[in-house]
Amino acid sequence: MSDVPFLKMNGLGNQIIVADLRGTNARVTPEAAIAINARAETRFDQIMAIHDPRTPGTINYVEIINSDGSRAQACGNGMRCVVQALTAELGRQRFTFETLAGILFGEETEDGQITVDMGSPKFAWYEIPLSEEFADTRYVELQVGPIDAPVLHSPSVASMGNPHATFWVKDDVWSFALDRFGPLLENHPLFPERANISIAEVVRPDHIVLRTWERGAGLTQACGTAACAALVNGARTRRTARKATVTVPGGDLIVEWLDNDHVTLTGPAEFEWRGNLNPTTGAWTRSEAA
């Protein structure tokens, strides 16, 4: 398999590789993803693999690969990186993509911020999905710690193309050992497809502070779909407004749950460097040219 070009980028510290597989039949293999992630220079949270379009009306099909080689349905920070990369290449600002989560829209604005329409949230237990029925997913029976004094409990759960559990706390989100219990909750039997686990503090109705253990990636500086899930879960539990700043370790995102039920995610993306990689083996070379 011939090498393909890639860009090393980030979205608020969410480490992203944008791989250009257009014009090929190749896919990034799990083995390649694990090999790429094993090197410090190319360590990533998600690979956004750009393929030729599969559906009329879309510019590209984007496959999303986690650092453990598993596939993800959606990645808001990664989609912003894709929009920025294609805007720089093609000179246009608005795009329609297809992902496993469905059809997504993105655009770069004049101030350099990038907005991605992440589609509609899903709240039914079988859509998220959960392994057992809950009539109301604003609160589900799940806790960390002793039964009579849990550290975390009763998360709100939703799907933003991938499963999310949002635990609401009143203390500083950094005071919780998310690195310790994140892996346990990600793989809890309640989540047959695993889940992204977040701790959220509502500072004001228009401001949420958030930390996330990402399914297949671990602790990250930013998780766009988790920010979207926190906002919609906050709004439907009457903790937040339908638009808020979501502060993640890497910075601020703006999330809005529109009247048409779609959720938009706005924030920056940053180019770091470019290179070429083999999508089968993960071998890569770096180009010094920006």
Image (cartoon, rainbow, N blue to C red):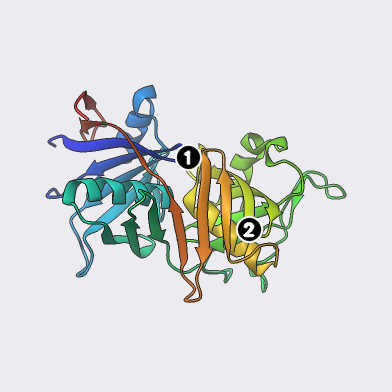
Q: Which numbered tag is attached to residue 108?
A: none
Alpha-carbon neighbours of circle 2 within 10 Å: few (<14), some, or many (≥20)? some
Please state if 195 lies on the left or on the right of 24 as rendered: right
Disc nearest the viewer among 2 and 1: 2
> Judging from the image, what secondary structure is the residue with disc 1 in?
loop
Q: 102 and 89: which one is in front?
A: 89
Residue tagged by mark 2? 206
Give the amino acid at mark 1: Ala
Q: Position of residue 23 (x, y in %)?
A: 12, 50
Find residue 290 and report its horizontal and vertical position in percent.
Answer: 22, 30
Q: On the picture, is 40 further left or further right than 213?
A: left
Tell me the residue at 58%/46% (across/down): 247
Residue in view at x 59 percent, y 68 percent:
125
Q: Nearer the viewer, residue 68 or 290?
A: 290
* Amino acid marked by disc 2: Asp
Q: Residue at x 61, y 48 (%)?
A: 198
The residue furthest front is 111
Q: Pointer 2 and pointer 1: residues touching (CB < 8 Å)?
A: no
Residue that lies at the very extreme toward the bottom in this rendered image = 260
**Residue 119, quarter of picture:** bottom left
Q: Left of 242 or right of it: where is 108? A: left
Depicted 231 relative to depicted 214: above or below? below
Which residue shows up at 36% across the image and 51% down it? 79
Quadrant where the N terminus is found in the figure: top left
Q: Which residue is nearer to you in this view: 281 or 176?
A: 176
The reply to whether residue 64 is in sight is yes
Q: Quadrant of residue 180?
A: top right
| Picture disc at residue 217 | 1
